[in-house]
Each structure stands twice: as C-alpha cells, then as structure tokens.
C-alpha cells in the first residue's frame, strides 16, 4: 500500500487542528457561560459516549470523501486549504467579545433585536430575528464579518467540507451543458450569504457564469469583498428574496442552495422550490444542501434536538421532520436523490425536459 502524500498528511493535520480548536473553543465558552451567565443554559439532551464515537466516525468519513473528490479532480486540492486565515485571526477576538450579548439574549429569550436602521418592510417577518442568537441577526456588517468563523467553530472545522458536497452532483448535472460549447453555462447560488459556496463553485467550475442572491445587503458586501480578492470572472450578486427572485424564467442551467431551508417556515420552503423550478431551464439541476433530518439520521437525534434548543432556530424542529422530497415533487421536480455527509444532507433534482 502506497504511503500517503505530504499534501494528504497536511490536509489531515489541518482538519484535526480545526476540530481540536473548535472543541476547545466550545468547551471554554461553555465553562465561562456557567460562571458568568448560568441562566443562559438551555438544559441540553445528554450526549453519550456511543454518540460521540459515531460523530467522530462520521467526521472521518467526511474527511475521506473530501480528499477523494479532490483527488478525482472534482475540485483542486488547493481548495482544501483555502480560507481567509488572516482575516479570521483578526476577527476571532470579536467572537469572544460578542459572547456576553449572546448569553444575555439566550437568558432573556430576546430573539428580535435587530439594528434600528433596518427598514422592516424590506424583509419577510420570519427573517427579522437573531438566528443563532447572533448580534443583529443577518443584518449588519459586524454579523457578516464573524459569521463564517462562527460556523467553522460550530462544526469543528467541517463547514467548508460539507459545502463542497454540492460540487460533485453539480458537475454531474452540468456535464451535458459543459460539453456543449454553444452558450455560456449559468449557475445561481441562492441565499449565498458571504459567498463561501460561490467560492467553492468558482474553483471547481471556473468556466461557468456565476450569480448569487441573498436578502442581506451586509452579507453580500462581505461576499463581494471575498470574491473580488480571487482570480476568476466577476460574480454577479443581487439582493433579493428567494421566494420571489428577480430573474427570468428558464434562465439558469443549475441552482445551488446551501443551509437555507432549516431557517425557513414551511410555506417559504415550498415557495423557494417553486421559484427554483421556474428559474431552471428544462433539464436543469437543483442542488440543495442543508441539515440532516430525523428520518435518515436517527442516531444524531440528540444533536439535532440540542441544536434548536441551544441556538435560536425557530423553524429547525419543523425542518427536520419535513418531507423535502415531497416538496420537490409538488414543485414539479423529478429524478430526486439525496445523500448524507456528517451533519449535512444533499439533494439533487432535475426539471423535466
């Protein structure tokens, strides 16, 4: 058996380091909360040793497939190491400084503290919340600047690895278009946030024309900052609601949507899928990635129950029992498949020709 390459060893070491850093951060922050804000403790479901071992095995499987996809050329190996490390190092103290405010909101169950300069009429009511108890919700520069780092800590350094699970099915869905050089292939990332998924797609598919849409102007500014610092074609970013997107029907060959659905009420999920169906040209592909659900990951039930208790996730409990496959069908999609990777479930569906 061939020995692992230096790059593979480096990747494994990086992932191990991020995991340990995430665990250490959460352990220390929990102990500080117990001392300074014990009332913020939500009384979580217990996590036993068997579950901890299963989580570890699931993370190891994610690391293996992440490396295998890079080796197979789904995306360049350099993407495995790509992150705004210096930027995150600068912002890390802000995560700690923000923590007392988070504890206070958890303790007093304050979930709608949004910036006073926000025009509430510009947003659906369900969006005007402190998701994850984060300061300003998704509606400020401060929130946008520390969000990606917070998510990496939450998932112990696996957030980008989970995002990359959309790339293999996306490339399969686009194969027929990429082999046909008569027109430019267009891909839209829905709820693009700070643009992390767009960055992954840009590295994997540099030849496609990329678009991104999000409700938060602050997060789009952060996305523009990150994307403009990279080589590659300009990405067109638009502020808008995924339930009513400002694009022509049948104008995209593929759509991606990552980590949005668990933050939507049930009717909004269906509305977004209906819009996705409208925007895709016949034969086009939608790749949807979000949290695992109870029916396909019952071993992780305690983790899912804790997630919506610890963080303010008002629609998560409904999401994990919702029949997303049926929602795809109701919108008109066909060839619906799904797979799970650690804490992420990925769907692929086509608009019939």
Image (cartoon, rainbow, N blue to C red):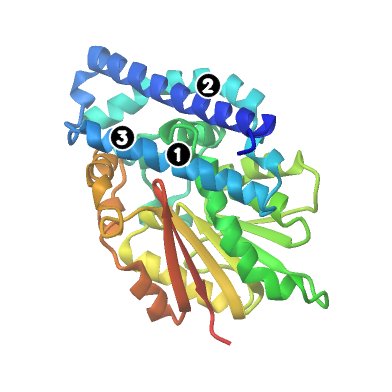
Q: Nearer the viewer, residue 70 or 121?
A: 70
The residue drawn where x is 39% and y is 79% is: 329
* Contact check, label 2 and label 1, Cβ < 8 Å: no
Report whether residue 279 is seen. yes
Give coordinates of residue 266: x percent, y percent: 31, 64
Give coordinates of residue 35: x percent, y percent: 24, 12
Mark earlier in primary sequence (2, 1):
1
The residue drawn where x is 26% and y is 55% is: 294
Which residue is tagged 1? 60
Q: Quadrant of residue 245?
A: bottom right
**Callout 2: SS:** helix
For marks 3 and 2, give the one nearer the viewer: 3
Please identify the quadrant where the C terminus is shown.
Answer: bottom right
Q: Residue furthest right?
A: 182
Which residue is tagged 3? 53
The answer to whether residue 103 is left or right of residue 45 is right
Mark earlier in primary sequence (1, 3):
3
Q: Quadrant of residue 78?
A: top right
Mark earlier in primary sequence (3, 2):
3
The residue drawn where x is 48% and y is 55% is: 122
Which residue is tagged 2? 92
**CA–CA distance in space, label 2 to label 1:** 26 Å
Report whether residue 139 is seen. no
Q: Residue furthest front?
A: 1
């Amino acid at each position: 058996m061939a020995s692992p390459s230096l790059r593979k060893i480096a990747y494994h070491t990086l992932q191990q380091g991020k995991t340990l850093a995430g665990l250490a951060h959460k352990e220390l922050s929990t102990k500080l909360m117990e001392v300074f804000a014990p009332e913020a403790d939500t009384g979580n479901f217990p996590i036993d040793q068997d579950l901890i071992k299963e989580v570890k095995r699931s993370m190891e499987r994610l690391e293996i497939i992440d490396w295998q996809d890079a080796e197979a050329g789904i995306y360049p190996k350099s993407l495995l190491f790509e992150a705004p490390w210096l930027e995150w190092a600068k912002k890390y103290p802000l995560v700690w400084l923000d923590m007392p405010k988070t504890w206070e909101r958890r303790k007093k169950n304050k979930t709608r503290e949004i910036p006073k300069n926000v025009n509430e009429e510009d947003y659906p009511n369900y969006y005007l919340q402190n998701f994850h108890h984060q300061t300003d919700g998704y509606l400020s520069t401060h929130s946008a600047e520390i969000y990606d780092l917070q998510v990496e800590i939450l998932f112990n350094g696996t957030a980008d690895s989970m995002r990359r699970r959309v790339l293999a099915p996306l490339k399969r869905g686009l194969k027929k278009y990429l082999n046909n050089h008569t027109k430019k292939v267009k891909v839209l990332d829905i709820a693009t946030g700070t643009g992390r998924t767009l960055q992954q797609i840009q590295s994997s598919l540099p030849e496609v024309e990329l678009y991104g849409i999000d409700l938060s102007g602050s997060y789009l500014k952060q996305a523009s900052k990150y994307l403009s610092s990279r080589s590659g074609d300009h990405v067109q970013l638009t502020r808008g609601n995924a339930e009513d997107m400002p694009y022509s029907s049948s104008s995209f060959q593929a759509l991606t949507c990552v980590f949005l659905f668990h933050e939507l009420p049930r009717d909004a999920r269906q509305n977004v899928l209906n819009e996705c169906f409208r925007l895709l040209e016949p034969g086009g592909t939608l790749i949807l990635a979000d949290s695992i659900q109870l029916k396909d990951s019952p071993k992780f039930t305690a983790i899912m129950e804790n997630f919506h208790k610890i963080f303010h996730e008002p629609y998560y409990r409904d999401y994990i029992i919702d029949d997303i496959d049926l929602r795809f069908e109701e919108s008109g999609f066909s060839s619906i498949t799904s797979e799970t990777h650690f804490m992420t479930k990925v769907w692929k569906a086509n608009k019939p020709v």
